Amino acid sequence: MIDFSNLLDNLLLNSSKKKKIDFLSDYFQSQTQQNKIWALSILSKSFVNKLVKVKDIKELLKGKVDEDLFLYSYDYVGDLAETFSLLWPKDNSKIINSQSLSSFMSSLEKQTSKDDLIIFLTNHFSTCLPNEIYTTIKILLGGLRVGVSNELLKESLSKIGSRSKEEIEENWYGFSFPYNGFFEWLNGESLPKQFNSKDLFHSFMLSNPFNENLIKKIEIKNYTCEYKWDGIRGQITVSKNGKIYSRNGEDITSSFPELKIKSDKVSVLDGELVVKKENTIFSFNELQKRIGRKKVSKKILSDLPVHFICYDILFFNNLDVRKLPFFERRVFLQNYIKKLNHPNISISPLINFVSWSELRSIKENSFNNHIEGIMLKNKNSIYKSGRPALCWYKWKRDPFLEDFIIMYAQRGHGKRSSFYSDFTFGCWIENKINTLVPIGKAYSGFTNDELKKLDKWVRDNTLERFGPVRSVKPGLVVEIAFDNLNFSNRHKSGIALRFPRINRIRWDKPIEEVCILDDIKKLIN
Amino acid sequence: MKNWLIKKKSGLFCEPGNFYIDPIRPVDSALITHAHTDHARPNNKKILATKETINIMKIRYQDNYCKTKQQIKYGEKININGVHVKFVPAGHIIGSAQILLEYKGEKVIVSGDYKRRYDKTCQPFEINKCDTFITEATFALPVFNHPNDKIEVKKIIDSIKGNSDQVHLIGVYALGKCQRLICLLRDLGFDETIYLHGALLKISNYYETEEIDLGSLKNVTEIKDFKGGELVLCPPSALHDRWSQKFKNVIKGFVSGWMTIRQRIKQKNINLPIVISDHADWNELIDTVKEVSPENVLVTHGREEALLSFLKKKGYNCGSLNLLGFEDEDD
């Protein structure tokens, strides 16, 4: 297990992609089949423990470490696994030689109840090094945060066998733990017999952000324009089983039963999930109520019916159309949607334009609570996973910019641990300028130098501490950028901002000049 | 501590003695615990400190180091307007001192920064009894248990052996950490020339005049082309500065108590973290308070809350002094 611990540390401490790939491929080349299988399932996040949660891990320290000291430590370190591993009482006489990752994982899997697992962990922690405790907790709670995406993993695996990254990509979602035949296939053997290629998720084609410099570089007549709908990206697989996948390839069929379509022929559609009722698309907040449900009640089905706006087609009745150019796929898509004639599925319309200035005005006037801007797609682009250059561009509407006042601050996690980097901001409730109401939270948008200054400002202007949260003297104005806003009854202010981030820190701006809540509400159309 | 030692804007002030201790801005009269720049600042009118502290301030600030100076030896007693003052070793760096104050029968120790581990380059921390003990809290969280120095130093030697094609660029604080690290390396038999950034060389040369042997040292500028396998020490700030770009194919290390925490290592972009500190770790802080066994404990600069919470539960009368101006994140 120590090899795997070292791998995780090396991945965390080396941010270069090349080095990460080297570490990963070295690991996969040097380990036993069993270790490889486990490492792959942990790194690709397909291993999930359901027995113990954060709370149970914290519970393990009770009676061993003073609770306040744990809280201060956790607040400072900013990572539960690391805090835990440094606080767990060490007894050097009990430490035994590290076992292999696979033998540890198989004993872990044998624990079928939470109580058994807790006993197992207590014994395990008392016999291993802090690094292994850290690794164990990371494995159990997920969230390795070592900067390894599935893309990087696929690229590393393409270095150790005879399969290209594209081949691995294509079959990636057909393999799952215990990856029977996977490493053999990497080495050139054929796909295992039971391999099911029918219902496979296919990685999405994604877009690059548009910037004004591209106007000179790209030929406008080669591009089409569509709205960028503000929902969640989804993939409908029409097949014997009928599946819906999220952007990460997660099976979300049970949350959206309206879109489950069975057929003997396989077709795959790429599009956006939104909530739409009687020709009105609802805001993203409403869609959130549909996400993550295992069962959907009749009431929800009728109150918040889901709708799929199709962008593209990957398979048309068993025919792989991904290598065809966009404009030809579009014809297949139109035919397919027309024949399907499904009340909850429509096609994302193309918008006519002739000039860049026209496009710009389409983008800026697309203000609506379910449109984020526009998409430009190269008519000749094939469907390719990832973000291929010169193919698709997203051109988001300029964000809203408003000044707000910092009210609370909390220390960040991960690479921002120990810095006060999570800010709650607000504005005045009324013209009297004496009471603030929190509007939202922002975690990003500042440079490292600004982060240091913000951190110092928080420390110097703290009013009160509530656990990890500090309330601060109203005194610092920040300009917040956000993509959209809507009414919301979940928030005290009655409004919710979409993706707020700090655009500028207004060190010099007096807090009296910040707007009142009603001004913000007026922005909602 | 009664009303004769108070916190002012410029720092900790002794009223009857009319002097400050480690003031953060220029004052008429200052007692200096040690020569680190956040404790020893320039332009005070009069300073009282150990010989080493004064000498290093002179090297660093030249003409601005003070107007007049007075040297004090460890253990020597001085009476300033009825306040008895004594400096005793703090074990932090060369010449570092705890300052003992006694006024009308009441004893206070301002311990400055301190550590309890063996350090060849300075005298060890001395336990003294007092009524009020003022302690630092740089590493006052139970997650900090500094490992054995030798094991940590060996990591540098092993890394040089294992990666002989790479230059090892190691960040160390110019005063104290640098020379302690060199001594530890020499004790483990590392005899190669060590290349130093100019800022480090100046202070290291001073150590040699104090008869601390550091072996063969050279200024980085003496070599044009580093081939790999060399050990270069520089201030932490230079690790990611333009200065360090002249080294190609480099492993970056940092020697600090903060290197216990992975995310600190990542934040500082370090490949070779070495946990050696000139401050007491959690257990050493607690043991020191126990050994000094004061009636009152005041905690300053660092993670005060955790230490206060612990001491309160143990029945100590304690509070936060919260002196500003000390570099929290520096070791």
Image: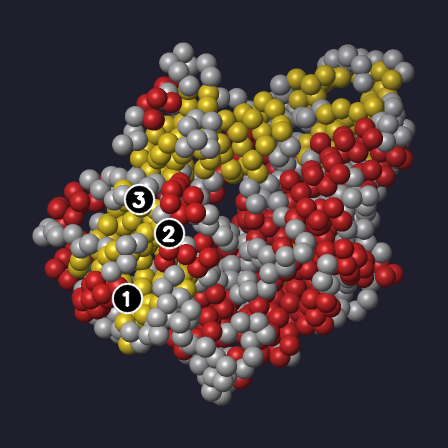
Q: Residue furthest front?
A: A298
- Please tell me which of labels 1 and 2 falls first in the chain: 2
Residue beneath label 3, please?
Answer: A277
Chain that bears disc 3: A
Residue A313: mark in rendering: 1
- Residue B162 x %, y %: 64, 71
Residue A476 coordinates in the image, percent (x, y): 45, 25
Give left or right: position of A482 versus B270: left
Element assignment for label 1: strand
- Residue denoted by label 2: A232
Compared to residue A429, the image places residue A383 above or below, namely below
Give the class, few, some or many, for how many residues have Cα within 10 Å of label 3's Cα (few <14, many ≥20).
some
Q: Which residue does the image show at 29% across and 74% down from the upper left? A: A317
Distance between the alpha carbons at the discs numbered 1 and 3: 24 Å
Residue pictured at 85% horizontal, 39% vertical: B287
- Are labels 3 and 2 on one chain? yes
The amino acid on which the numbered mark 1 sits, given as a three-letter code, is Ile
What amino acid is found at the position of numbered circle 2 in the picture?
Ile
Q: CA distance from mark 3 to mark 2?
A: 17 Å
Q: In terms of depth relative to the viewer, which is nearer, A441 or B72?
A: A441
Near mark 2 (Cα within 10 A), the count class, few <14, some 14-19 or many ≥20, is: some
Q: Where residue A264 appears, x then y in whole percent? A: 35, 74
Query: Looking at the image, which is closer to me, A492 or B215?
Result: A492
Which is in the foreground here, disc 1 or disc 3? 3
